[in-house]
Amino acid sequence: MTSLTFEQRQVFPCNWSQITTLIILSLSSRKIVMKIQSVFAFASLVGLTSAQDQNIFDEILSPFLTIAIPLIFNIFAGGALDVFNDMVSTALENFDPFEFDFEQESKVTDKVVDGCGDEKVPVYAVVKANEAVGLSTMVVNSLEMTDFELNSEGSTSGFSLDAEGGTVSVLLGGTMGPKVEDCANSENIDFNGTLLLDSPFFKFGLDGEVKLFGDLEVSKANITDFEFSWEDLTVNFTDLGDYSDIADSVQTTLISIAEDLANTVINKDFLQDAIDTVLPFP
């Protein structure tokens, strides 16, 4: 969760009229969301200090700020969006290409195979992949502060972000044929292919330590949830030789494997590892 550290200063009693005045003055500044949040939060804390009353803190100030801070942030979040977008883009550049190890076996269909007699035997595809290209095209286009909590130890907050990209491609390689126990006299064929994910989409939650005074700075970030989707997924593959007659079944199998690959490899841990490489940011 985001931690805000406030400087200790000599403060004087401040009523809600004064707080409102400070908010209005901050709205007229050019520092947009960071200035608005810092003045608003600090003015509220001044009121808390002058009150010296835990009941006021628990019953009035804390609930008020829980609603008000995210509201103001989300109205004027343009400047913060640029910072978060730069952070995510820079992080993903370090993972483009993204290297990994993936291998999956799946049954394609039953087929009469040369050297295996006249009966149909199961045909399997083993697919391998180790590199994805294009993840750095992701652009954060939506940022929302989802919560803000103020307590006696400080403050915490969370964010929700959406990001969209161009095309992510993954080179596929593999073999196809019966298993030895089903047919010892058949030789498997090698094939290559390409997985294309068009218009990939990230939706993720982020909690962290973010400096909201002055220039925004993210010192720590924790990915709390992650969803990965895409507009279109296609798989192209090379000539299958003696297995060309089952190309449609191969296509269906490879698409299923490709979906598993995308959801297995591009996950919450992937994004966390990428963002960790650029913190603190900027």
Image (cartoon, rainbow, N blue to C red):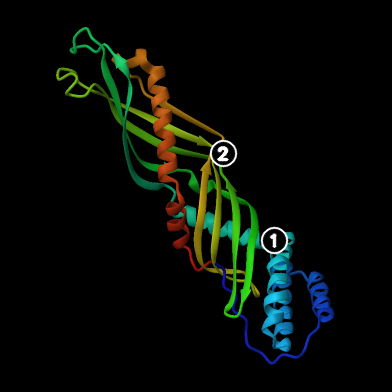
Quick one: which residue is furthest to the top in this view?
118
Number of residue marks: 2
* Horizontal relation, residue 250 to residue 2: left or right: left
Sequence order check, earlier mark of 1 and 2? 1
Q: Amino acid at mark 1?
A: Ala
Other-residue count near label 2 (Cα within 10 Å), few / some / many at <14 / 14–19 / ≥20? some
**Residue drawn 80% across and 69% down?**
27
Q: Which residue is mark 2?
A: 199
* Horizontal relation, residue 184 to residue 13: left or right: left
Question: The residue tagged with tag 1: helix, strand or loop?
Answer: loop
53, 199: nearer the viewer? 53
Q: Which residue is mark 1?
A: 77
Give the quadrant of the N terminus: bottom right
Q: Is residue 282 visible?
A: no
44, 255: nearer the viewer? 44
Q: Position of residue 42 (x, y in %)?
A: 70, 79
